[in-house]
């Protein structure tokens, strides 16, 4: 029980740092230099303003200097980070490989939030997530296997991206040809449509390193199921042309499958 409590507290502390990463990296700011400050009034925060989760509760979600609202993102990320490390330690115990696996999921959590807020997937965090996933093994053979699976799914996602982009762009081309005129016949009147970002490819590689072949395929399928209701809701509310950040769904599906891996494998073997 004490180990799980320590794991939860440690995870929340990491979550506090993840909030710094989520805020500063998209704005090209240093995550090392410069103290935490209110984004509205600029006042440097006191140490008791940075206690994970509890500071936000005690301050009632407002800056103690200017009274500006503090985003609920901060306690949610801290709480989520604490739960991630708690669940990993509860399942595997505490060890160096588990620490690396947790760090990989922490990077993926940061990527998910940045993708949601800014629709961007920083390469620095993506590479760190992949590196931690590869070395998060209990043996040298496991590290090599993780690396092999990462390459496999990086290639698979790249081929999928190429095929889907080609199909969507070809469809747009056919539609554009129906409205071509003598004035536009020498110009491209259709866009090149990318079905998947490069960041998704790296996340796919990380998924392969963490889960292996069978479980990654399940996670990809699960991520599509999780994303479908959101896509339908956005299309019904805002019409066609809405883009949905896919990284959060890939990450959520990966964590679910990772925690319940034995149940998922049993289900897959029963089906096939």
Image (cartoon, helix red, strand yellow):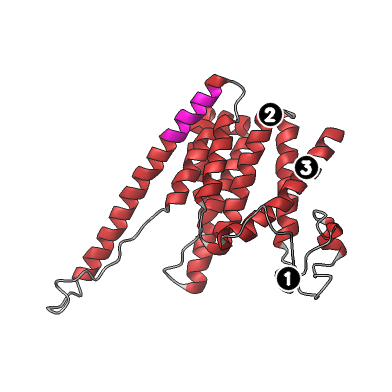
- Residue 239, numbered label: none
Q: Disc 3 versus disc 1: distance between alpha carbons?
A: 28 Å
Relative to 110, is 132 above or below? above
- Where residue 32 sits: x, y (%)? 67, 52
Instruction: Identify the mark nearer the N-term, 2 or 3.
Output: 3
Q: Badge 2 local density, few (<14 within 10 Å), some, or many (20+)?
A: few
* Res 96 label: 2
Residue 258: horizontal and vertical position, in percent? Answer: 61, 36
Q: Residues within 10 Å of mark 3 (few under 14, many from 20)?
A: some
Residue 39 coordinates in the image, percent (x, y): 70, 69
Q: Which residue is mark 3?
A: 10
Q: How many marks?
A: 3
Q: Is residue 36 visible?
A: yes
Q: Position of residue 225 (x, y in %)?
A: 52, 50
Residue 66, image quadrant? bottom right
Write the start and end of the magenta stretch as one range. 142-151
Is residue 145 covered in magenta? yes
Which secondary structure lies at badge 1? loop
Front residue of this view, candidates 214 and 138? 138
Q: Is residue 58 left or right of residue 96?
A: right
In the rendered structure, the answer to whether residue 195 lies left or right of residue 255 reads: left
Per the image, is 132 magenta?
no
**Which residue has dot 1 on it?**
42
- Which sits earlier in the primary sequence, circle 2 or circle 1? 1
Q: Quadrant of the N terminus?
A: top right
Toward which corner of the image does residue 267 lie, by quadrant?
A: top right
User: Overall secondary structure of the magenta stretch?
Assistant: helix
Tell whether 243 sits left or right of 46. left
Disc 2/disc 1 C-alpha distance (Å):
38 Å
**Label 2, label 3: how many angstroms apart (C-alpha)?**
14 Å
Please tell me whether mark 2 sits on a helix, a strand or a loop. helix
**Position of 98 relative to 82 (above/below):** above
């Amino acid at each position: 029980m004490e180990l799980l409590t320590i794991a939860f507290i440690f995870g929340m502390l990491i979550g506090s740092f993840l909030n710094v990463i989520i805020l500063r990296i998209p704005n090209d700011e240093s995550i090392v230099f410069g103290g935490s400050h209110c984004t509205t009034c600029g006042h440097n925060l006191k140490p008791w303003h940075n206690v994970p989760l509890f500071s936000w509760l005690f301050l009632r979600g407002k800056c103690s200097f200017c009274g500006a609202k503090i985003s609920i993102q901060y306690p949610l990320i801290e709480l989520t980070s604490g739960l991630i490390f708690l669940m990993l330690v509860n399942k595997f115990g505490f060890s160096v490989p588990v620490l690396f696996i947790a760090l990989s999921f922490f990077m993926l959590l940061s990527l998910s939030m940045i993708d949601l807020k800014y629709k961007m997937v920083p390469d620095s965090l993506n590479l760190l997530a992949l590196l931690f996933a590869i070395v998060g093994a209990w043996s040298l053979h496991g590290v090599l296997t993780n690396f092999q699976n990462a390459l496999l799914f990086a290639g698979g996602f790249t081929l999928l991206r190429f095929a889907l982009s080609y199909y969507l762009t070809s469809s747009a081309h056919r539609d554009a040809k129906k409205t071509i005129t003598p004035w536009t016949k020498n110009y491209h009147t259709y866009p090149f449509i990318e079905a998947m970002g490069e960041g998704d490819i790296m996340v796919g590689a990380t998924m392969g390193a963490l889960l292996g072949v069978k479980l990654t395929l399940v996670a990809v399928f699960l991520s599509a199921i999780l994303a479908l209701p959101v896509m339908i809701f956005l299309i019904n509310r805002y019409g066609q042309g809405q883009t949905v950040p896919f990284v959060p769904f890939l990450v959520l599906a990966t964590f679910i499958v990772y925690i319940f891996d034995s149940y998922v494998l049993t289900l897959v073997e029963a089906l096939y």
